[in-house]
Amino acid sequence: MTERTFSILKPDATRRNITGKINAVIEGAGLRIVGQRRIRLTEAQAKTFYEVHKERPFYGELVSQMTAEPVVVQVLEGDNAVAKYREVMGATNPEQAAEGTIRKLFALSIGENSVHGSDSLDNAKLEIAQFFTDADIPG
Ligand code: CMP
């Protein structure tokens, strides 16, 4: 089934000028980048986006890292896009990520792990709606 998922290329990726390399892996896996914008997340946006993690010990550092430098927000489309992108990203902790995955190839640490991807179709819809309107995604 054709789906859309939400992706963020994180500050460690924009800082190292590797967004094109990451996009090549995404496109090589058959996912189409149908929406893309480079932005600086506000603290309010980052806090809302990561609200599910607000009780976790890494929440403060996560919000400050995600707001310190630009990110690229994306909408990816393809067959089973949510699960496919999670496979392409690899495990959250790059030490556990499979060969060939974005995090194995590029991530620096569990915090600076280069990419975010939605964990379910419901969350994908909510996350996309935080950053994109239908008009941003031409058919
Ligand atoms: P992401 O998919 O963006 O969702 C939450 C982020 O928190 C996660 O990727 C990691 O980059 C970050 N994070 C930092 N420390 C941890 C941790 N110990 N466990 C899980 N996620 C962490």
Image (tube, grey):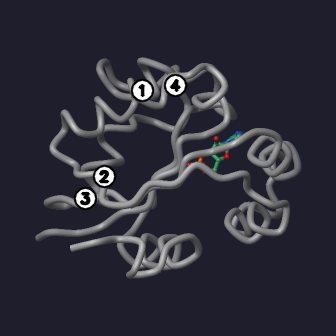
Mark 1 Cα-neighbour bin, 10 Å: few <14, some 14–19, many ≥20: some
Q: Which numbered disc flags the more N-terminal residue, 2 or 1?
A: 2
Task: Look at 55% across and 31% down and name the residue there.
Answer: 93
- Of mark 4 and mark 3, the one earlier in the sequence is 3
The answer to which of 15 and 7 lies nearer the viewer is 15
Q: Earlier in the sequence, mark 1 or mark 3?
A: 3
Q: Nearer the viewer, residue 75 or 98?
A: 75
Which residue does the numbered mark 1 point to in the structure image?
97
Q: Could you tell me which secondary element the residue under label 1 belongs to?
A: loop
Taking the spot 47% from the left edge, 71% from the top edge, the residue there is 128
Work out whether mark 2 precedes mark 4 in sequence or the reverse, and give the earlier one.
2
Q: Which residue is mark 2?
A: 33
Amino acid beneath label 3: Ala
**Ligand 1 closer than 8 Å to label 4 CB:** no
Q: CA distance from mark 2 to mark 4?
A: 23 Å
- Mark 2 or mark 4, whichever is nearer to me: 2
Real-space Cα separation, disc 2 to disc 1, in angstroms: 23 Å
Percent x, y of residue 30: 15, 44
Query: Which disc, if any, is residue 130?
Result: none
- Residue 94's disc is 4
Label 3, residues with CA under 10 Å away: few <14, some 14-19, many ≥20: many
Which image quadrant is residue 27 in? top left
**Residue 86, percent from left and from top:** 36, 47
Instruction: Kindly report which numbered mark, 2 or 3, lies closer to the viewer in this rendering.
Output: 2
Q: Residues within 10 Å of mark 4 (few under 14, many from 20)?
A: many
**Quadrant observed for ligand 1 in the rendered image:** top right
